[in-house]
Image (tube, grey):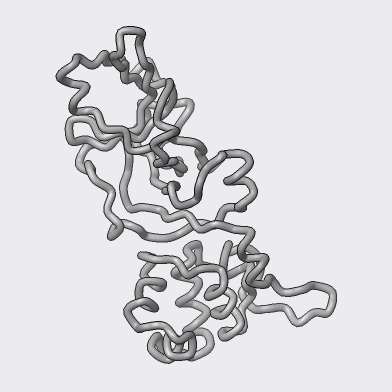
Amino acid sequence: MTNKLSERIIYARKSKGFKQKELANILKISLPTMNHYESGKRAPNSELLSQIAKTLGCDPGWLLTGEGQSEKKETHSTEPMSSSTLNDFVLVPRYNVEASAGGGSVIHSEQIVDHLAFKASWVSKELGADPKNLLLIHSIGDSMEPTLRSGDLLLVDRNKARMKGDGIYLINFDDGLMVKRLEWMMDGTVVIRGDNISVSREQKLTAIEMEKLHLLGRVVWVGGKV
């Protein structure tokens, strides 16, 4: 039906016949804030998500993740997802930028198109990451195959403490936004390479080229179609 949090909020609001301003007034938030939620530029916190679900009579789990039915089930055996349960999830912004090609040296907040929900315990225990440092982007091209495929969704950790050692990084190099494997050499230089050796060649940066290299984050998870 809808695969974005912002789209699900709009769908639930319209299905109940609310205008955007009417719902904003009920939630006691400004119209611009409501517009940001419905455009995907911002994501409501768990308490507000619970309030939206209650006001619109939709299932909080569906509103947050898109899974299940939109209508809240009136059953005695299953408790509705509460604000405290919603706190079990974190919302990570997905940006309208593609890594591996040039033309995107800076990631702006205006480029947020949606937020995806991840289990907070998984982010903390498996990734060891702080949610506020995470972002999602798509990869393009085949230079990192088979590790990364074109269209894969990449979870990037912008924590500067994670940006050390060999690994796959989101980088800005020579005004191009790309995802590459970086390897630090004993002499302090860096080698940039793609995993697909048939289409990608490694590049050892000179001292001058090193000044053009900016680490934007480390790829910590990848998801895509099977």
In percent of width and height, residue 102 lies at 22, 37
Residue found 22% across the figure and 22% down from its top: 210
Q: Is residue 135 above or below residue 111?
A: above
In percent of width and height, residue 170 lies at 35, 35
Question: In the orientation shown, which residue stands out farthest toward the left?
Answer: 208
In percent of width and height, residue 142 lies at 37, 29
Comparing 64 with 210, the one in front is 210
The C terminus appears in which quarter of the rendering?
A: top right
Question: In the orientation shown, which residue stands out farthest toward the top?
Answer: 186
Quarter-wise, where is residue 82 in the image? Answer: bottom right
Residue found 33% across the figure and 53% down from its top: 96
- Answer whether residue 201 is visible to the viewer in this image: no
61 horizontally vs 151: left or right: right
- Answer whether residue 151 is visible to the viewer in this image: yes
Q: Is residue 169 above or below residue 82?
A: above
Residue found 64% across the figure and 59% down from its top: 88
158 horizontally vs 76: left or right: left
Comparing 61 with 71, the one in front is 61
